[in-house]
Amino acid sequence: MSTLGVSMINEHALTYKEKLCVEDLNYIIKKANRLGLLDRQLIRVYQEEDQDGNHIYFSVEGLKEKHSKEF
């Protein structure tokens, strides 16, 4: 699937101070899997740093419209 024309959202996954631990990595994987279950394609994972620590973000497709059933 091409990402052209797809609305992208940067979704915060995790903040950590010094090093990622095994529990942090497991959490990141579970969160990525949940996004997949919601039919949102994960495009990339990246990190940013500020005074609060290191932040892991996912770039994902924007929320898909829900189709309502008409009665």
Image (cartoon, rainbow, N blue to C red):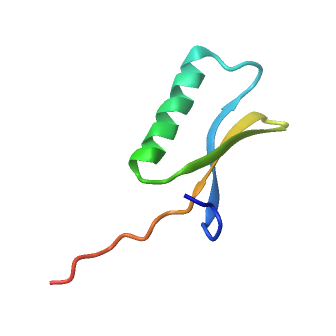
The quarter holding residue 68 reads: bottom left
Which residue extends farthest front? 1
- Residue drawn at (73%, 18%) of the image: 19
Residue 17 position within the rendered picture, expressed as x and y whole percent measured from the top left: 75, 25
User: The N terminus is located in which quarter?
Assistant: bottom right
- Residue drawn at (52%, 28%) of the image: 27
- Residue drawn at (58%, 23%) of the image: 25
- Residue drawn at (60%, 60%) of the image: 2
Residue 71 position within the rendered picture, expressed as x and y whole percent measured from the top left: 14, 84
In-front residue for pair 66/41? 41
- Image-based side of 33 in relation to 53, left or right: left
Residue 29 drawn above or below residue 21: below
Residue 58 position within the rendered picture, expressed as x and y whole percent measured from the top left: 63, 45
| Count of labels in the image | 0
Residue 6 position within the rendered picture, expressed as x and y whole percent measured from the top left: 60, 66
- Image-based side of 2 in relation to 34, left or right: right
- Image-based side of 52 in relation to 66, left or right: right
Which residue extends farthest top? 22
Which residue extends farthest bottom? 71
Residue 68 drawn above or below residue 51: below
- Image-based side of 55 in relation to 23, left or right: right
